[in-house]
Image: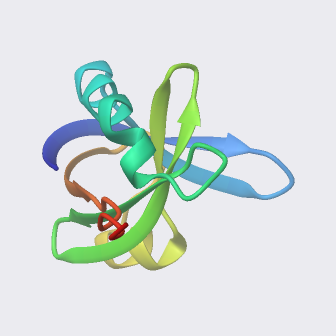
Amino acid sequence: MEFVFSGRVIEWRGPAPYYFVRVPDEESADIREVAAMATYGWGVIPVEARIGEVAFQTSLFPKDGGYLLPLKVAVRKPSGLSAGDDVTVRMTVRLHEPQPR
C-alpha cells in the first residue's frame, strides 16, 4: 500500500523533542483499513518512507484517529528539515506476509 502526501513538520516537546509529519485524514483512513495486517502491537504501523533523497524505515504512531510519521535526526539533518517546514512524503505500509495454516 503506497502513498504520496504533503505535510508540515511538527515538533512535540516531551522529555526530548520529537518531530513528526501528520498523515492526512484520507490516507489515515486507508491505513486503518489494513492496520490489522500491518501492526506488530500498540497500534504502530511499520512503513518505508522517503523525503527527498532520504529513504528510511520507521513506524507510524496512532494519534487522535490518524497517524504521525516520526522524523529522526538521520532523516531531518541531511534534508535540513525543522519544525514548520513543508515536505512531500512517499510512503509504503509494510504488511505482514500471510502465515500458512
Task: Name the quadrant containing residue 75.
Answer: bottom left
Q: Residue at x 34, y 79 (%)?
A: 78
Seen from the viewer's position, the closer of residues 101 and 51 is 101
Q: Position of residue 33 (x, y in %)?
A: 31, 30
Seen from the viewer's position, the closer of residues 11 and 48 is 48
Q: Position of residue 64 (x, y in %)?
A: 58, 20
Q: Position of residue 15 (x, y in %)?
A: 86, 54
Q: Residue 96, relative to residue 93: is it above or below?
A: below
Task: Name the quadrant containing residue 36.
Answer: top left
Q: Residue 88, relative to residue 97: is it above or below?
A: above
Seen from the viewer's position, the closer of residues 100 and 98 is 100
Q: Residue 6, relative to residue 15: is it above or below?
A: above
Q: How many circles with numbers are drawn on the protein?
A: 0
Q: Position of residue 23 (x, y in %)?
A: 35, 35
Q: Residue furthest front?
A: 101
Q: Residue furthest right?
A: 15
* Residue 32 shown left or right of residue 89 in the figure: right
Q: Quadrant of the C terminus?
A: bottom left
